[in-house]
Image: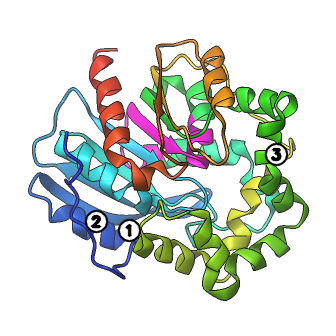
Amino acid sequence: MTSSATPAASAGAPFDNASVAARLLELPFVENARALTVSTSGGEFAGFKATPARPDPRLGDALLLHGWPEYASCWEKTAGLLLEQGMSVFAYDQRGYSPGARPESVDEYTMPHLVADLDEISRSVGLGRFHLVGHDWGGMVAWHYAANHPERLLTNTVVSTPHPIAHAKQVQADPDQYERMEYMRAIQDHPDGVARTLLRNNAERLIALYAGDVPDDMAASYAARLSEPGAMDSVLKYYQAADGRARLSSTPVIVPTTFVWGSEDIAFPRATAELTVEYVEGPYRFVPLEGASHWLPESHPAEIAREAIAVAREHSSS
């Protein structure tokens, strides 16, 4: 599998769903790619969908779920690589990120709502059983979705985010993991102040979070979209809602699962990543990427696509 399937966007190129779809459509092995809006009970969600010219019937469909502070466009290169192998792809901007699904109440950003979004949206775009790939908050949703809707999934590829119980235990037991969650506590205590700080001076602090691992033009696109009125306030509510106010089971995970983690992840140390194995009952593979950061969709799309394709092929008859 190569890492050059998706053409590089020029400096300053937009990274909205329509632009991503247009670039995917330029690839010789893509039959169709388009931006779309999915209307659900939770609002209207923006996304993109693409199909390969030569689908591999063993692979089927992949749903790609982004994290914070990113958009569905973070998956552009991964999507191109999956399409090259014959897998269809669909990705959407989660609630808070999609302007048409931006509720005001913090209670509307709890895990039950995020999982319900995924279930309703995947059905609305015609997906049967599918391969789920989630990063960061998308990875957290993936763990919970796999536990609550295993009948919908063929495989589960989680990127960067350890299992939520492993993470919670390490926050209590490991000073390193506790200290790495200081940003989350700051958001919960002072969301308005965090939002102002991240967006001040043309979102200088926000862009600094990516530490150079997100291409400059893509980081600028994230910053511009999160600077729109109400956007940053909304996406910070994920953290405000993660205070135990509404829980959803994250076990058992019986779906074939791959966990891809970067050794230099700023949020999750190795001890937490390695503890995840204790909370997966189905086939499981842990893939540490040495020297890689938290921002794997943007910096290591080839590795993510490789692992998603490998687990899909291994369990294509399950």
* 33 relative to 104, above or below: above
Q: Is residue 199 left or right of residue 297?
A: right
| Along the viewing direction, whichever of 236 and 50 lies nearer the viewer | 236
Q: Which residues are magenta?
A: 122-142
Is residue 128 rendered magenta in the image? yes
Q: Residue 310 is drawn in which quadrant?
A: top left
Q: In whole angstroms, how far apart are the C-alphas of marks 1 and 3?
A: 35 Å
Contact? badges 1 and 3 (CB < 8 Å): no
Q: Which residue is mark 3?
A: 179
| Residue at the limit of the structure toward the front, as seen here | 291
Contact? badges 2 and 1 (CB < 8 Å): yes
* 170 relative to 32, above or below: above
Q: Is residue 85 left or right of residue 242?
A: left
**What residue is shown at x 15% (from left), y 54% (from top)?**
30
Query: Mark on residue 21?
Result: 2
Residue 156 percent location from the top left of the image: 46, 30
First of labels 1, 3 by sequence position = 1
**What residue is shown at x 85% (from left), y 60% (from top)?**
186
Three-letter amino acid code at the position of disc 2: Ala
Three-letter amino acid code at the position of disc 1: Asn
* 241 relative to 47, above or below: above
Q: Is residue 149 left or right of residue 55?
A: right
Residue 23 percent location from the top left of the image: 23, 67
The quadrant in which the C terminus is found is top left
Helix, strand or loop under label 2: helix
Residue 19 percent location from the top left of the image: 31, 73
